[in-house]
Amino acid sequence: MSGCLNEATLIGNLVRDPEVRTLQAGGKVVNLRIATSERWKDHATGDRKERTEFHSIVIFNEALGRVAEGYTKKGTKLFVRGQLQTRKWSDKDGIERHTTEIVLQRFRGELTILDAPRSSGSDEPRERVTERSAPARSMAEDLSDDIPFSPEWR
């Protein structure tokens, strides 16, 4: 089926430090747990309500994993873009379990630290760290020289 899209985008806070594991093949995988919250006012009672969701993030992308490992910790606010994937397994009692995760594949995904921790003794925030799996291309790079353009359009 053409025209399908599987993309999840979150902005949330890490609920614990990143967990880094080494795969048998030698690569690394970084696991994050992010909380997102929704707040609203209950019109019937006037009470403020809040619902928090917890999301599992799995990073197979080497560059994004290095950013997560080196620049994030519990409480860091992140922007994450990846694909939803459901994994099934049997636990030690033989009961089938499943989980849905947001996966940043080897050549896909995006991770942006939105509130990098401040350096000690400084009121200035550190530089914002952004990594994407593929470098952004400018519109000019996408245009072919075979297409004639009028000089006033450039």
Image (cartoon, helix red, strand yellow):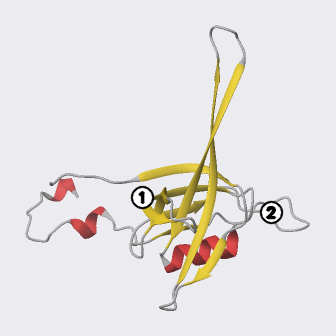
In the depicted structure, whether residue 129 falls above or below residue 86: below
| Front: mark 1 or 2 | 1
In terms of secondary structure, where does tag 2 sit?
loop
Task: Tell me the residue at 39%/72% (across/down).
Answer: 134
Q: Quadrant of residue 67?
A: bottom right
Q: Of 98 and 12, which appears nearest the observer?
A: 98
Task: Tell me the residue at 80%/60% (across/down).
Answer: 124
Q: Earlier in the sequence, mark 1 or mark 2?
A: 1
In terms of secondary structure, where does tag 1 sit?
strand
Query: Are the two marked residues, 1 and 2, in contact with CB atoms closer than 8 angstroms?
Result: no
Using a 10 Å C-alpha cutoff, classify the residue at mark 1 as few (fewer than 14 neighbours), some (14 to 19) or many (20 or more). few
Q: Quadrant of the N terminus?
A: bottom left
Q: Quadrant of the C terminus?
A: bottom left
Q: Quadrant of residue 34?
A: bottom right
| 3D distance between C-alphas at marks 1 and 2 | 36 Å
Q: Of 5 and 77, which appears nearest the observer?
A: 5
Residue reaching furthest to the top: 44
Q: Position of residue 6 (x, y in %)?
A: 33, 54
Q: Check residue 118 in the rendering and tell me which mark sits there, or answer none.
A: 2
List the residue tagged with mark 1.
Answer: 86
